[in-house]
Each structure stands twice: as structure tokens, then as C-alpha cells.
Amino acid sequence: MAAVKRVSVRRGMAVAGAGMAVTLVIALAGCSASEVSPSTSPAAPAPSASAPAPTTAPVLDPAESATENLPYFDFISQNVLTANPEAGGRDFIDALAVGGFDKTQMELTPDRTTVDLAADSVLFSVRFNSECLVGQSGAATGYHSYVAPILASGTCLVGTTRPIDW
């Protein structure tokens, strides 16, 4: 009796496997490539190598949101890093102020740790139209930025910040 059950189980598994294979073949047949008919519209012209690329630099727009001004914030920060890849916090703050951001609305983390080692990265921010533009730069992390809500404390950065008193 055990031999009969074993054969029945094997037969059932074989039938189920064959059924799944047929289902798979049918499903994949629907994914086969169909013949592509030629387009009747002309192809788009290839860009000319001599055509100048748009080079419009972003500008500060105080009437817009922080998100809409993030490209300008990044533009200034990237220029700082282009001029000095090892830029410190003061470099970013000074450039943002020259770029039109309000220095009294800025925050900055220390460039040095509590044991007087160079910080892995520096964070800087600007409170702007009820939001925060936040940048981070460091040798290991590169440059990153984002827009964040103002914290309940009324600040943009968590933790210790240094005075911007210059």
C-alpha cells in the first residue's frame, strides 16, 4: 500500500510541475517582442556639438520657498568647494551671506571636535521662509544638502553649534 501512495504522490507532483511549466510558457509568450512598425514622424535632430549649453546660474528668490531656492544654496556651496575642496564652516557662511542669505538666520557646527581634532564634516543651515536649507560637507562624505522643517526649538540643526560672530 505504501508503494501505491508513493507512486500517486510522484504522479501528482509531475502533473503539477507540468501544469506550472505550461502556465509559465503561456505567460512568457505574452511578453515576447512584437514587431515594431517604422515611425512616420522624422527623428529628432541630433544636438549640435557647437550649440552652447544653457549656463543660467540659479538666483536667490526671497519670495519663493526653501525648496525652490535649494539650487541656489547648492550653487554657492559648490562654488565654495570648487575654490577650496577643504573649505571650513566659515567659508560656507561667508559665501552664503555674500550670496544674499541673512547671516542672522544661519547656524553652523564646529570645525573641530571637543578634543581638538578636525571634524569629519561640517553642517550649516539657513532658516528661510519657515523652512531650513541644510548643507553638509566633509572629506569622507562629500557635499549633501536638503530642505527640512524648522525644529520645535526654532533652530535647524540639532546639537552643538558655534556662534557666527564675525
Image (cartoon, grey):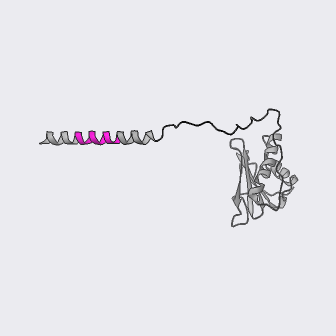
> Which is nearer the eye, 48 or 13?
48
Q: Is residue 158 left or right of residue 97?
A: left
Magenta stretch, main secondary structure, is helix
Question: Looking at this rendering, what residue extends furthest in the left direction?
Answer: 1
| Residue 114 percent across, percent down from the top left | 71, 51
Return the residue found at the far front: 40
Residue at 59% across, 37% down: 37
Q: Is residue 129 above or below residue 31?
A: below
Q: What stretch is highlighted in magenta?
A: 10-20
Could you say where residue 45 lies in the image, as x and y percent from the top left? 74, 36
Residue 101 shows in the view: yes
| Tally of marks | 0
Outermost residue, top direction? Answer: 49
At a point 68% along the width and 41% down the height, the residue shown is: 140
Pick the residue in front: 56 or 153.
56
Inspect the magenta stretch and tell me whether residue 29 lies in it.
no
For the residue pair 126 and 117, the one nearer the viewer reads as 126
Q: Is residue 119 visible?
A: no
Classify 122 as above or below 66: above
Q: x%, y% of residue 99?
A: 86, 52
Where on the picture, by quarter, is residue 117? top right
Which residue is pictured at 72% across the width and 60% down the height?
A: 156
Q: Which quadrant does the C terminus fall into? A: bottom right
Q: Position of residue 75 (x, y in %)?
A: 80, 47
Q: In this view, does 10 lie above or below 122?
A: above
Q: In which quarter of the image is the N terminus?
A: top left
Q: Is residue 37 left or right of residue 144?
A: left
